[in-house]
Image (spheres, rainbow, N blue to C red):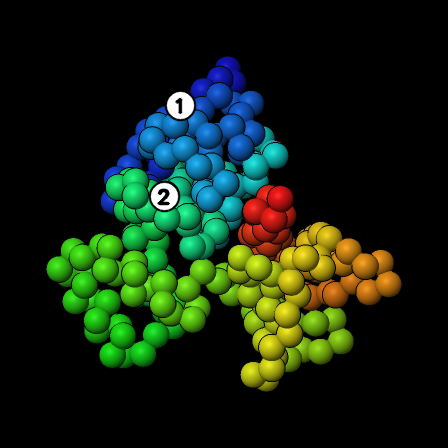
Amino acid sequence: MVRKVWQICVYAGMDDYHVVMDQKAVGRELLAQVLEEVGVKEQEWFGLQYKDDDNFWHWLVHDKKVLSQRVSEKNDPIVMFLKVVIFPPQPSLLDDPVAQSIVYVQVRVAIESEEILCSSKESSVFKELAEADKVEEYLTKAEMMSEYGWWHFLMTRPQDTTPARVSVGLTGLILTVDNRKFDFPFSEVDEVWASGKKLMIKYVCKNISTTTFMGPNNNFTKDFQFLANAHHHHYLHSAI
């Protein structure tokens, strides 16, 4: 007999929450359900992450059925993590203690795992602030860092195996190769698309050729596509 509902355990900041999901639910519906349970209203800032059977991380795609993605159905409950996708969140969001907790835990993990690089001196300061439980001061200092708010991916180009860092932020994409930076502002980007390992940036101006990058695997480029399109949508919505 096919199960009609699934138990979902969601880790959000320093707390965990449990919801019951219909088997036909799509990602956007589950995210809305989780945020309602958590008590946070602004959906566009958040996303859900999960691990598959091979222990790889994925972002839950909004417009696909949850159970048609690589969510492991072996687990009961299914475990997911509520995370902020777009940084920095609007100030009013951080007035909410729950939202602040989610951002704090996420940023702290990124700093301690060196996803956000900082000097040994800065690292010591962050450690002291975390031990003293000074959350607001911790986040204020984090926002001053140059890499705060950016998602970084290492890729190559079809005819060049030199590693290139492609970063996603509030205003666009940045390609960094051999310490040289090239901007791809969202005002000029029409679409970011992934096909297998291939990632393509298509432009508003049709006379500009599509820029292509290669990721190490399909999941990698799909995650980049998810984050880039979330930021692109936010940019266009904010510009209205």
- Residue designated by label 1: 20
Mark 1–mark 2 Cα distance, whole angstroms, equals 29 Å
Disc number for residue 92:
2
Q: Secondary structure at mark 2?
A: helix
Residue at horizontal 51 percent and vertical 28 percent from the top: 29
Q: Residues within 10 Å of mark 2 (few under 14, many from 20)?
A: few
Q: Quadrant of the C terminus?
A: top right
Image coordinates for residue 19, horizontal then vertical, percent? 37, 26
Relative horizontal placement of residue 179, taking residue 204 as reference (left or right) = left
Q: Comparing marks 1 and 2, which lies closer to the viewer?
A: 2
Look at the image and tell me whether residue 13 can be seen. Answer: no
- Label pair 1/2, CB-CB below 8 angstroms: no
The quarter holding residue 34 reads top left
Outermost residue toward the left?
132
Residue at horizontal 57 percent and vertical 40 percent from the top: 61
- Measured along the vertical axis of the image, is residue 72 above or below residue 94? above
Disc number for residue 121:
none
Relative horizontal placement of residue 138, taking residue 232 as reference (left or right) = left
Image coordinates for residue 238, horizontal then vertical, percent? 57, 47
Look at the image and tell me whether residue 12 can be seen. Answer: yes
Outermost residue toward the right?
207
Relative horizontal placement of residue 233, taking residue 147 as reference (left or right) = right
- Measured along the vertical axis of the image, is residue 190 above or below residue 120? above
Sequence-wise, the earlier of marks 1 and 2 is: 1
Residue at horizontal 70 percent and vertical 72 percent from the top: 157
For the residue marked with disc 1, what is the amino acid? Val
Residue at horizontal 33 percent and vertical 46 percent from the top: 94
Image coordinates for residue 208, horizontal then vertical, percent? 82, 65
- Work out whether residue 102 or residue 3 is closer to the camera in this orientation and state it: 102
- Work out whether residue 154 or residue 102 is closer to the camera in this orientation and state it: 102
The quarter holding residue 33 reads top left
